[in-house]
Each structure stands twice: as structure tokens, then as C-alpha cells.
Image (tube, rainbow, N blue to C red):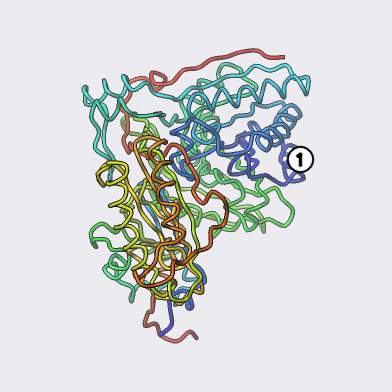
Amino acid sequence: MPSLGEVIPKIRSKNAGPFWVTIDLFCGTPALFKAVATRLSTAEVAKLFSQPAPAVKRFDIEDLNVVKFSFPRPVVQGSRTDRDMHGAQWATLLAEYDINLPPSP
Amino acid sequence: MPTRILIPSGVLGLGFDKAALAKGVAAKPDLICIDGGSTDSGPFSLGSATSKYARSVTKSEWRQLMLARAEAGVPLVIGTAGTCGADPCVDWMYQITCELAAELGQHLRIARLYSSQPSERIIDALAQGRLRALHPAPEVSPQTLGEMANIVALAGAEQIQTALATGADIVIAGRTTDTAIIAALPLARGDHAGAAWHGAKVGECGALCSTNPMSGVILVSFDETGFTVQPMADGATCTPHSVSAHMLYENSDPFILYEPGGHLDVTRSRYTALDARRVRVEGSEWHPGAYSVKLEGARLAGYQTTILAVLRDAHYVANAGKWADNLHAFLTGLIAERMGLAPETYDLEFRLIGVNSALGAMENKVGTPSEVGVLGLITAQTAEIAAEIGKLANPHVLHYPLTKDEELPTFAFPYSPAQSDRGALYEFALNHVLELDDPMSAFNLTVTEVA
């Protein structure tokens, strides 16, 4: 099974203020958007980041072929136990996540 | 008449394309504005009320913008001066501006907008029910509010309009929302309110909404029905995708943006390519609401000393987690024995670089690194205690063995001393809004003439 990062053009994460982190999956094409939006569940993403599923907000944005997830940072940005000030490395967990997608055309 | 706002880059200190700035000035803007910071880099700037950017870089870029202002003959506005926008940072920026005014021979009227909040004002607001927690918000009490190192309120368009109404050539604003400095003039002129806020959001990171983010300079034109955005650098283009995708950036909700006095909704915005470079946006909605300003606060969370060592010996690399756990337990005992400190009075943590230092417990990949960096973080109530624990730990971080019956190892220290005293550690401690009857009641304005 390929990883998400091998299938879609871009995955990024970043703080949305000190208390939230947001992750954008740029799928590139309507076909890949539909495949990712259908097969990647919010529960899977929540588990990857050790979050309760109801804490994760999800936006399927068809016009941009983007699936977006936002959730409160488990550790406030820059506090003693924070390990990633900008939250930008969190995206790697999704980029490396294996997903069962149909082969690209 | 459209209102044209020229934005040289997403933040003062990151640089911009000089030729693009010249083109922007030639396009006859009505105002030039730039952001001076955000919470992006962490709580230290707000905690210490200092800029994260080098003074030399700030001054050299501000010189170019002051020259551009003089040529364009329009106001120049900086928001969130000095990274965090606390009062000392506004004064720091004002000092730089005065030096440049003298060096350039410019006679200027300068308005300073101050955003710092005395803790008593916020404690009163808490008692009066005018302090509203956002989600998720740290617990606050009169005591925790009184202990904040610095609190700032994010000014909106109204406060920037008040500063511009003084006839200032330059406005140096403390903490503002990223968008307020851009939206203020179009709103004052009666341009479409949804467009003013949406265009401001698109433009607030400069050319990040274009295909050439590093070029910096962008021009946003506002009118009665919408806005048009165009990058100024040769070869940079804006497309409906690059412009609409910017609402995703650093936003937890890509359709709704809360600002003082209401919120922007871009659910029904329409993005149209006017040509190969320019994008037109209409249909953005502004929904007025109660007037409140967001607060940011940083409090002292202790003092830190760090220590760094590198394990290269394959046996130690393979057992780094166990080694660090053993060392932690050993040091905890030694600190109690030698310094009389119970574990709950300080914090000692080892992070293994090459294993899981970026993601911690979320890390799900097991690699085979050739070396492992050991970053020890010591946090204590005083800098002296943190430094003393660092010295106590030093020889053991260097020589601690995995088993009792082996020759003492010696790991790689990258420098001498291996420990570094980092000083104060701050943490963000407010995610609240302050309700105001009068937008200016939590802000101060000072106007001076300099030559």
C-alpha cells in the first residue's frame, strides 16, 4: 500500500495560533480528492495524533481538492513539553500513513 | 475610486523584492502596510517584550519602506511592531524610525498605537464578566492574570482608523490582527466590508498568495463590490487557486475568520482570473457582532538550562531509550541527595534526537540511526537552580554506563561547557477575548512630530 505522501502532491501542517494545529492535504485532482475524502476517516487521523475523534474538525473542500483537519494542540505552542514550535513536522505522520487508494490513472 | 493597499511582504524582517516594491509604488497605492510579527515563533517575544528579528535587518528594511512612503506620499503602517506588539516593542520601533528620520532628513508625524494591557484591567474584566474564554483556554484567575509577564490586545480596524485619522505619515501599532492594518482604510472609505477583510486576509502574508511567495510584494485593490489582488514581482502570478487556498493557511477554519466587531464568511466567495496575473474576488460576507478584542498573554514558566551530548557507540545508540531512563532515575536521586530538591520542584527531561525528539509519543517509526543526540532540558524556579542541576548532570551525561560492569563510556560533547543556560521560559497563558464598549478604551494613541 502506498503512503498518502506518495499519492498526493502536498501535505502540510502548521499552528493556527498557539492553541490549534491545522493540517492541509492538497490532493491535486478531483479524482484523488474524492478517493482521499472517501477513504481517509476522521477517526484514523485522530488516532494518528492521539486525539479523541470529536476534537478533530474536518473540512472537505471540493473547490480546492483539499481535505483539512484542525484540532486543539495537545500541548500549547512553546510550553515546556512542546517539541515542535510550529507544528510543521506533524504532517509527516499523515504523509507516511499507508492508505488503500485506487491506482492513479 | 478603488482603495489600493501595497503590502511589501508578510512580515518586516524577511525581505522583499526591491524592483517589485518600486513597481508597487509606481502603481500609486493609497497606503503601504506591513506586519511586524505574530505568535508564530513562540511565547518568548511576548514574555520578554523583545523582537525576534535583528535590529539591523529591521532598520534596513524599514529604511526602504520609509523611502517608498516618501515617494508615494501616503501613510505607512506597521502592525504588531517588534514581533509581539507589546509597548516596549512599539517604542523600539519608534526609536528606529526616529533614527531613520534623522538620517533621511524626513519630517514626520508619527502615531504610536499601544496595545499592552495592565493586568488590573483584565482582572476587572474577569470580575465584570467581560472576559470570554475561547476553546481551548487556559484557566485564569485574578492571581494568574496578575502573574502575566505581558498581556496584549489585538487591535482591529477601528483603532488603526483612529491612528490614521490623526494625519500620521507613519503609524507604529502594537499588537493588531494581521488583517486590521490592511482592512482599516478600505473600511473607512466605505468599500465592501466582506471584501475588505477577505482581501486583507489574502494579502497579510504578502506574496504567499501568489506563485512566487518569496517575492513579497502584493497590491490589493478594494472597491464597493469586491477586491482584486496582484503580485508586483516579475514572473509572479495569482491564480484563483493560489488566492483561495490562502484561507487554509494557519486558519483552523478555512471559511470563517473572527475579527474585532464581527466575522468574515468566505463560503460563497467567487474567485475569477482577470488575466494571467490578477484575481478578482466577490461574494465575501461580513457579519457584524459584539465588539471584542482577542488577548494574548505570556507568563514566566521557569528558567531553563539545556545539555547536549551525542551517542555514537552502536551499543548505546541501540539502547538509547533505556540509557536515558536509567540516567534520569540516577540523576533524580543525586539531585535529591546533593541539592535536597524533590522531583516535583523542578523538571528534568531527556529527548533523543534521531529517535522521537520531534513527535514524542506520537512517533510511530522505528529507525536505525547511526548516532543519537541527547538533549537534556532542565526547568527550575530560578536560573541558579537550573544552572546548578546542569552542572551536576554534566559528568553523568558524559560518562553514564548502561551496566555496572563495563568500562566508563565517554560520549561526544559538541562544545564546552556542554550545558547552556537559556534564561527565562515563557508560556502562552491566555486564549480569551475582552469585550469592549468603546474600541479605543483598551488602547492608547500618542502622536509626535519628528524631524
Dot 1: element: helix
Query: Mark 1 falls within which chain?
Result: B
Residue B82 in percent (x, y) is at: 55, 32
Quarter of the image where one finds residue B433: top left
- B50 relative position to B434: left or right: right
Q: Would residue B59 appear left or right of B272 to someone viewing this image?
A: right
Percent from the top left, x then y, of residue B192? 49, 37
- Residue B239 image point, x, y percent: 59, 58
* Residue assigned mark 1: B22
Left or right relative to B22: residue B79? left
Residue closest to the eye, A61 or B303: B303
Q: Nearer the viewer, residue B336 or B382?
A: B336
Residue type of the residue flagged with mark 1: Ala
Residue B123 picture quarter:
top left
Q: How many marks?
A: 1
Q: Nearer the viewer, residue B55 or A19?
A: B55
Q: Residues within 10 Å of mark 1 (few under 14, many from 20)?
A: some
Residue B181 vertical placement versus B388 (above, below): above
The C terminus of chain B, quarter of image: top right
User: Is A13 located above or below residue B88 in the figure?
Assistant: below
Residue at 39% x, 32% y: name it.
B260
Q: Residue at position x 37%, y 32% from top?
A: B295
Does B354 appear above or below B70? below
| Towards the viewer: B11 or B151 | B151
Q: Position of residue B131 (x, y in %)?
A: 27, 29
* Image quarter in which the N terminus of chain B is found: top right
